[in-house]
Amino acid sequence: MGRAHGHKTRDKNKGSLPQVPKNMKTDGVDEEYSAELADQADLEAQARANAANQRVRNNR
């Protein structure tokens, strides 16, 4: 009898783990933004980020 015969039950719950719906998932960004406190560099960075997001969406 090989070693693997005694370890088959450790992954038995993988099929029953709950899945998170797509509408409840986040992109992992937890930054606060205040338009009143934004300077020119913040506005340029936001524009670059939006442009990058558009490129990613268009490539999918």
Image (spheres, rainbow, N blue to C red):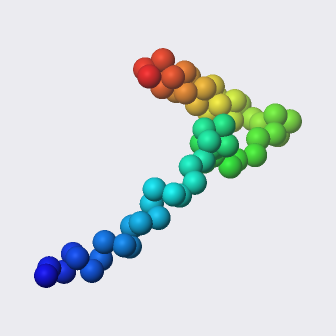
State whether residue 47 is above or below residue 13. above
Residue 28 visible in the shown view:
yes
**Residue 46's spot in the image, x, y percent?**
65, 31
Residue shown at the point (23%, 76%) measured from the top left = 5
- Residue at the extreme top: 58
**Residue 14's spot in the image, x, y percent?**
45, 60
- Residue at the extreme right: 36
Residue 59 occupies which quadrant of the picture?
top left
Residue shown at the point (60%, 38%) measured from the top left = 22
Residue shown at the point (48%, 25%) measured from the top left = 56
Residue 1 occupies which quadrant of the picture?
bottom left
State whether residue 42 is above or below residue 10. above
**Residue 24's spot in the image, x, y percent?**
67, 43
Q: How many labels does the image show?
A: 0
- Residue at the extreme front: 1
Residue shown at the point (60%, 26%) measured from the top left = 50
As rendered, which of 6 and 33 lies closer to the eye? 6
**Residue 37's spot in the image, x, y percent?**
82, 40
As rendered, which of 49 and 39 lies closer to the eye? 49
Using residue 59 as the reference point, say whether residue 29 is left or right of it. right
Using residue 14 as the reference point, say whether residue 47 is left or right of it. right
As rendered, which of 18 and 33 lies closer to the eye? 18
Residue 41 visible in the shown view:
no
Q: Quadrant of the C terminus?
A: top left
As rendered, which of 40 and 14 lies closer to the eye? 14
